[in-house]
Image (spheres, rainbow, N blue to C red):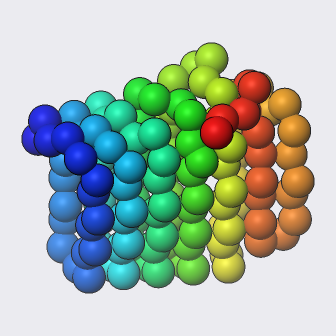
Amino acid sequence: EDLQGRLDLDSVSGKVTGRQLKGDASVSVVSGRVSLRSCDFPALNLSTVSGRAEVETQFGGGPYKLSAVSGSLLLVVPEGSSCHVDASAVSGKFYTDLDIAHSSVSKRRWQVQIGEGGP
C-alpha cells in the first residue's frame, strides 16, 4: 500500500491486492486474482491466462495494453480521461461506458482512443 515506482507483478495463483500504487506497471496473472485499487498508473501492461485482474487507476493517460486467454480483465479509469487502450482476448468481450473518440474492433482485438488519447 502507498508505494511509488515501477511495479512488476507476476502471480501464478492466489490473491494479490494493492492500493495507492504509483508508477508504470506490468502485471501478469496465470490463475488467481489481482486487485489494484486507487492507483496512479501512467502506463500499464496487464495480462492473464485464466485468472482475474482488476485495476483502478486515477491517471488516465496510458497507453494501457491488456490481454487475456480465458481470464477476465477490468480496467477502471476516471470519467473524462484521455487514453489509448489496446486489448486482446482469445475468448471474451470488450465493453466501456466512456466516450470513445476512435476505435478499431475485431473479434479478438480492441483498440480505442478515449477522449483525446494519451501519450
Horizontal placement of 113 versus 29: left or right?
right
Q: Do we see residue 56 in this rendering?
A: no
Residue 94, compared with residue 103, is above or below; it is: below
Residue 48, compared with residue 105, is above or below; it is: below
Q: Position of residue 111 (x, y in %)?
A: 77, 54
Horizontal placement of 14 versus 64: left or right?
left
Quarter of the figure with the C terminus: top right
Q: Position of residue 4 (x, y in %)?
A: 20, 41
Residue 29, image quadrant: bottom left
Which residue is found at the position 38% from the left and 49% from the top?
Answer: 24
Q: Give the residue furthest to the top.
A: 80
Q: Position of residue 100 (x, y in %)?
A: 80, 32
Q: Position of residue 43 (x, y in %)?
A: 48, 47
Camera-side residue: 79 or 97?
Answer: 79
Q: Give the residue furthest to the left.
A: 1
Which residue is found at the position 66% from the left and 72% from the top?
Answer: 89
Q: Do we see residue 52 in this rendering?
A: yes
Residue 61, image quadrant: top right
Q: How many marks?
A: 0
Which residue is found at the position 37% from the left and 64% from the top?
Answer: 27
Which residue is found at the position 41% from the left and 27% from the top?
Answer: 58
Horizontal placement of 48 versus 119: left or right?
left
Quarter of the figure with the N terminus: top left
